Amino acid sequence: MTQGQMLMQMLPLLLLIPLMYFLLIRPQKKKDKETNKMRNSVKVGDEIITIGGIVGKVVKTKDDSLVIQVGADKIKFEIMRWAVSRVTAEGKSIKGGAMEEEEAPKKALPKRMKKAEKAVEETSESTASESAEEAAAQE
């Protein structure tokens, strides 16, 4: 075998290494960097979800751990920062110089409540259109 033939056989393998880097290693490093940034930016008042599925509000931060408040009984316990899966709601923001609570995301309603809400909207729309018609008739 000549040197050129051996190089041609090794060429696909040599091209596979940079391809693996750009398709697998680089995106994973980028994702890890963003996750670490999110975990380090957690502050008091943020609502978080842990990797175990526990939802709580951060009441105290330390170097490598967080103290969160959970449930109606407001039980507090300490978790490690690496256990934070995601931040669901920012606790407080500064608007106009005053600290205000941000609006919580709207929760989904059960089907029966959606039907009742829709019925109420329909009746209020029909009464509003009837009163508008009566006002137009009186003029």
Image: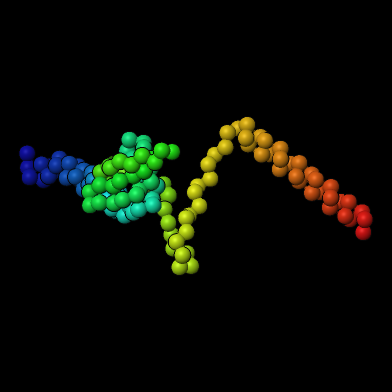
Q: Residue furthest front?
A: 73
The residue depicted at 53 percent of the width and 42 percent of the height is 107
The residue depicted at 22 percent of the width and 52 percent of the height is 63
The residue depicted at 14 percent of the width and 42 percent of the height is 10
Quadrant, the N terminus: top left
* Closest to the observer, 68 or 80: 68
Q: Residue furthest bottom?
A: 97
Residue 82 visible (yes or no): no
The residue depicted at 36 percent of the width and 43 percent of the height is 69
Horizontally, is 122 left or right of 13 in the view? Answer: right
Residue 97 image point, x, y percent: 45, 68
Residue 16 image point, x, y percent: 21, 43
Residue 17 image point, x, y percent: 19, 45
Horizontally, is 107 left or right of 87 in the view? Answer: right
* Closest to the observer, 96 or 10: 96
Residue 114 location, quadrant = top right
